[in-house]
Amino acid sequence: MERNKNWILLVIIIILLLTGCFYYFTNYNTPGLKVRVSRDNEVIDELSLNEDIQKDYDNNGEINTLVIKNNSADVISANCKNQVCVDSKTISNVGETIVCLPHKLIFEVVEN
């Protein structure tokens, strides 16, 4: 009987440790991340992934709308013909990018 109690206690401790590790790596791994927006190799904006925001990037009528929500970024609309940037998946990890070639825009997740 004592042996079963020890196993149950060990399993509970392991579950708590795994839950703590998961929480740490999903919630504390992103504070220093931001989205760098560049056009023609020139950085035009940098936004934190921790703050929910919607922002339009307008360059002579070429418009892309970026939304940052829940620590990820997504281009939700653009007035380019091919819509590749809009169809791209959301980005949230360092090195991930969304590119709008017609508007020469690059949205990239970088560290601070």
Image (spheres, rainbow, N blue to C red):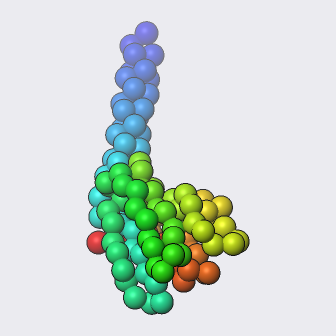
Residue drawn at the location 43% of the way across and 20% of the way down: 8
Residue drawn at the location 35% of the way across and 51% of the way down: 52
Residue 7: quadrant of the picture: top left
Out of 66 and 49, give the one closest to the viewer. 66
Tell me if residue 96 can be seen.
no
Quarter holding the C terminus is bottom left
Quarter holding the N terminus is top left
Residue drawn at the location 43% of the way across and 28% of the way down: 11
Residue drawn at the location 32% of the way across and 62% of the way down: 48
Q: Position of residue 15 (x, y in %)?
A: 42, 32
Q: Position of residue 110 (x, y in %)?
A: 39, 72
Q: Position of residue 34 (x, y in %)?
A: 35, 66
> Does residue 89 appear to the left or right of 91 in the view shown?
right
Tell me if residue 5 can be seen.
yes
| Residue sticking out furthest to the right | 82
| Residue sticking out furthest to the top | 1
